[in-house]
Image: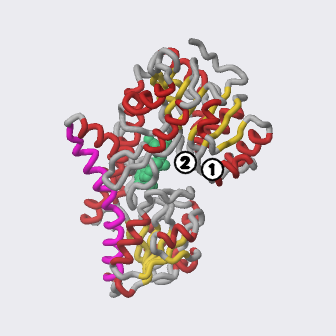
């Protein structure tokens, strides 16, 4: 069975989101004919007009160029996409449900559609983050409903996506790729695809299971280390230590890399992926206390910020019940428009439950999303006029905040983007995660 990835090889990509669309556009730019398949007609329509529905630097141009030259197009007909391609890539979201169990419905739908058009010598690549074992226990059985046998008739590889939102194009074209497959042919074929778009090293691991595990280790490593930084911050706050100063000093140690304390961990990845490991550990009869507790520490941070806000208002002789709180930033991290799993949401809801009137500004996130969290969407000036200003997201725009802009003299800064000194000199109360 031999599929040389040659000019004219047709690729279908299931899921045209933050990772799928950049991957599709980059593969089209490399000369492959790419058919994107998504269940959302608005996304498909925008792409076929040469527009990117995703806000990501450089993506609009890439989509426009590749749609114009006919190498990239999109459809809502997943079965047709499968029938019209030799390489099938699954890059769909894999959230967790209310019990923190993986919801793999999108992967199932994509694999069922692919099996309807799968042919001998085709290659299937799964990129979606999944619990280890998903390729073997879910994807392959669904793909084999085509009557073809994985490994004998078609290839399957797993390669986790690692591009950082807001720097996706650069990371996708430079980051190393980890690839595991059902057999050598699958790994080599998948490698020849990614070598077209990344100059990064291709790291081949022994099998699908190992590659699935690598992705979860990466993001769980970060989540647990952020939890450690947050726990340090709470201890430092109780002792009157500036945790950021202590962390900066500690990180001079050649083998120490303490992460940055913050208001909590958001995003579609770090706040979700660790639960996939907890899930598989439980299935294997193994406990995973560190991973679970780290998630609890990070999920508790928005409530700690609400506590800091209440305490700071009380020190000023005000009650949170009758105060206005101005939130700066609701996106899950700086300079992105993504508010998925953002810590701003539980923070806003907690402040409202305490009786505060909550206003929120974010230059990237829609007023509708802000309203859906329960806050009043306002401009930056209005947020800065509130009894207590809480900086939640490290958008660059907030680096220009001056003490005189904090009208009521109280700022809770949960990110390391402002130097406290100028505010303290101007009698602005400056508190924050890790700062007392
Ligand atoms: N955060 C902190 N302190 C830190 C670092 C981050 O509080 O020291 C917060 C951020 O503000 C944000 C959250 O954690 O709310 C996650 O931010 P992130 O930048 O660490 O992660 P993501 O979700 O934007 O992207 C991660 C990346 N994974 C790793 O860095 C190992 C990216 O490479 C992955 O592709 C992505 O998850 C994913 O797709 O899984």
Of the 4 image quadrants, the one containing the C terminus is: bottom left
Mark on residue 56? 1
The answer to whether residue 36 is above or below residue 394 is above
Write the start and end of the magenta stretch as one range.
286-314
Q: Is residue 238 left or right of residue 98?
A: left
Q: Where is residue 144 in the image (x, y as percent from the top left)?
A: 46, 25
Q: Position of residue 239 (x, y in %)?
A: 25, 64
Q: Relative to the observer, which residue lies in front, 190 or 436?
A: 190
Whole-number angstrom distance, CA of label 1 to CA of label 2? 7 Å
Label 1 with label 2: CB-CB less than 8 Å? yes
The answer to whether residue 68 is above or below residue 4 is below
Q: Name the residue under label 2.
A: 165
Residue reaching furthest top? 1
Q: Which of marks 1 and 2 is nearer the N terminus?
A: 1
Q: How crowded is mark 1: few (under 14 residues within 10 Å), some or many (20 or more)?
A: some
Q: Where is residue 365 in the image (x, y as percent from the top left)?
A: 56, 64
Of the 4 image quadrants, the one containing the N terminus is: top right
Mark 2 lies within 8 Å of ligand 1 (Cβ measured): yes
| 264 is within the stretch colored magenta | no
| Magenta: main secondary structure | helix
Q: Is mark 2 on a helix, strand or loop?
A: loop
Instruction: Please tell me which residue is depicted at 36% across the width and 42% down the height of the picture.
Output: 220
């Amino acid at each position: 069975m031999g599929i040389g990835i040659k000019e004219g090889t047709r690729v279908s990509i299931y899921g045209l989101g933050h990772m799928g669309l950049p991957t599709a556009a980059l593969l089209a730019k490399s000369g492959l004919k790419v058919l994107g398949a998504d269940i959302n007609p608005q996304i498909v329509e925008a792409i076929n007009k040469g527009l990117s529905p995703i806000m990501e630097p450089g993506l609009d141009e890439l989509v426009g160029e590749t749609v114009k030259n006919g190498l990239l197009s999109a459809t809502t007909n997943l079965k047709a996409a499968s029938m019209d391609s030799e390489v099938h890539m699954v890059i769909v979201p894999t959230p967790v449900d209310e019990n923190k169990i993986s919801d793999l419905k999108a992967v199932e739908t994509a694999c069922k559609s692919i099996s309807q058009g799968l042919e001998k010598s085709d290659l299937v690549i799964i990129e979606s983050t999944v619990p280890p074992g998903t390729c073997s226990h879910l994807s392959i059985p669904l793909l084999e409903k085509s009557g073809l046998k994985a490994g004998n008739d078609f290839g399957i590889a797993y390669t986790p996506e690692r591009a950082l939102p807001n720097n996706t194009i650069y990371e996708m074209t430079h980051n190393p790729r980890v690839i595991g497959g059902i057999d050598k042919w699958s790994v080599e074929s998948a490698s020849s695809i990614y070598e077209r778009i990344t100059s990064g090293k291709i790291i081949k691991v022994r099998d699908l299971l190992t590659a699935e595990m690598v992705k979860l280790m990466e993001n769980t490593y970060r989540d647990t280390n952020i939890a450690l930084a947050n726990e340090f911050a709470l201890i430092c706050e109780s002792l009157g230590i500036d945790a950021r100063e202590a962390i900066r000093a500690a990180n001079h140690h050649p083998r120490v890399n303490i992460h940055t304390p913050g208001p909590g961990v958001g995003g579609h990845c770090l706040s979700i992926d660790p639960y996939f490991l907890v899930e598989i550990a439980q299935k294997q009869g193994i406990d995973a206390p560190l991973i679970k507790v780290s998630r609890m520490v990070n999920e508790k941070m928005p409530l700690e910020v609400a506590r800091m806000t209440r305490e700071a208002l009380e020190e000023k002789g005000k009650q949170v019940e009758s105060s206005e709180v101005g939130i700066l930033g609701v996106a899950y991290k700086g300079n992105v428009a993504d508010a998925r799993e953002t810590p701003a949401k539980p923070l806003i809801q907690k402040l409202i439950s305490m009786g505060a009137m909550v206003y929120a500004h974010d230059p990237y996130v829609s007023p509708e999303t802000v309203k859906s969290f329960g806050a009043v969407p306002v401009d930056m000036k209005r947020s800065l006029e509130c009894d207590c200003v809480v900086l939640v997201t490290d958008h660059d725009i907030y680096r220009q905040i001056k003490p005189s802009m904090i009208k009521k003299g109280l700022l809770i800064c949960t990110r390391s983007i402002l130097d406290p000194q100028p505010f303290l000199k101007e009698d602005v109360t400056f508190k924050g995660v890790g700062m007392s």
